[in-house]
Image: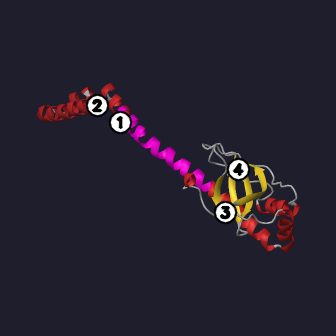
Amino acid sequence: MCLYIKVVISSGERLYYTLFKKHLFKGEKEIMKNKGFSLVELIIVIAIMAILAAAIAPALIRYIDKSRRADDVAAAETLNTGAQAALANEDIYDEIQSNHGFPTTGSATAVSATAGGTFSGTGYTLLTAEMNSSAGGTAPKIKYKKNNASGWAVGFNSNGKPVVWVTGVTGGAVELQPDIDSSYK
């Protein structure tokens, strides 16, 4: 840059040097301004991000829990549909009647399975096979673990309708079909 200034014609040298000098200093100031963020600015940004994360985390955890409960309810709906299909089969219906029949009050378990296992039930060979078939060979995995649920139970109520529970829950089984327990809503 200095070499170029010396080459300039003497009559225009002063004017050009003044313009060039202003441009040069302006460029140096811009360079000085753009060195980066100061430590204080970085700390402020990190503090703001921490506050936002603290505000968002509980909502995110609630959303994840809600989606896991919804997955379990959807799996219970699938098992309920399989049990309804099983009731349409006369042989399975007769098998239920010959074992214990439908309960006079409340609900009774016919078959059960641990999550990821196969359904089984004493005296319910045809129903067990149908439930394993409708569940795709294994019982659905339980997604919502906060209540210590470990398996599934399928039974029938006094009206002859299928009922699906999650088992292993602290305080007893929780019904998910046809009536969804309040802890899963």
The numbered dot on residue 31 is 2
Q: Residue at label 1?
A: 48
Q: Residue at label 3?
A: 77
Q: Which amino acid does the dot numbered 4 rest on?
A: Lys
List x then y, in percent, for residue 128.
83, 59
Identify the mark nearer the N-term, 2 or 1. 2
Q: Nearer the viewer, residue 104 or 142?
A: 104
Q: Nearer the viewer, mark 4 or mark 1?
A: 4
List x then y, in percent, for residue 129.
85, 61
Q: Is residue 90 above or below residue 3?
A: below
Q: Nearer the viewer, residue 27 or 170?
A: 170
Crowd tier of the residue under label 2, counting other residues whose Cα lies within 10 Å: few below 14, some 14–19, many 20 or above: few
Identify the mark nearer the N-term, 2 or 3. 2
Circles 2 and 1, Cβ within 8 Å, touching? The answer is no
Secondary element type, mark 4: loop
Q: Nearer the viewer, residue 176 or 37?
A: 176
Q: Quadrant of the N terminus?
A: top left
Crowd tier of the residue under label 3, counting other residues whose Cα lies within 10 Å: few below 14, some 14–19, many 20 or above: some
Residue sitting at 75 percent across and 63 percent down? 103
